[in-house]
Image: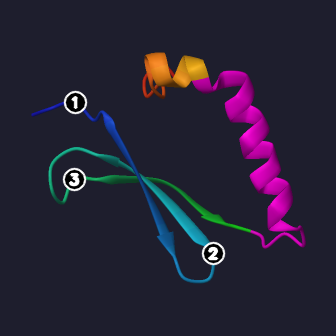
Amino acid sequence: MEPRDTLTFGLAPGGEIVVWMMNQVGNEVELARLQANEMDRNPDIYRANTREYLEEHGEYLKEHGIPLTGW
């Protein structure tokens, strides 16, 4: 059996988020079931924050990619 080393995030209508730890088919473990909240915020703010983040950290991400282990 492989170790449980894969996290899967599911998004459902109504803003529900489910997180599973995967192994073999039928042997997944549900870790969390969360309810997202709609924010009354202008989407342009998010776009500006993303642009700013990429200006500061974009070169590192291009060189090293997005870290997927150790967190």
In the displayed structure, would residue 69 be above or below residue 50? above
Q: CA distance from mark 2 to mark 3?
A: 25 Å
Question: x, y percentage for residue 1?
Answer: 9, 34
What amino acid is labelled 3 in the image? Answer: Asn
**Total numbered circles:** 3
Residue 5 occupies quadrant:
top left
Disc 3 designates what residue?
27
What amino acid is labelled 2 in the image? Answer: Gly
Label 3 vs 1, first from the N-terminus? 1
Which secondary structure class fits the magenta region best? helix
Q: Look at the image and say whether residue 17 sits in the magenta stretch.
A: no
Disc 1 designates what residue?
3
Q: Residue 15 bears which disc, if any?
A: 2
Q: CA distance from mark 1 to mark 2?
A: 30 Å
Label 1 vs 2, first from the N-terminus? 1
Q: Residue at x 90, y 73 (%)?
A: 40
Q: Residue at x 58, y 20 (%)?
A: 59
Q: Circle 1 sits in a helix, a strand or a loop, which is it?
A: loop
Q: Nearer the viewer, mark 2 or mark 3?
A: 2
Give the residues in magenta.
37-58
- Farthest residue to the left: give it: 1
Residue 54 occupies quadrant:
top right
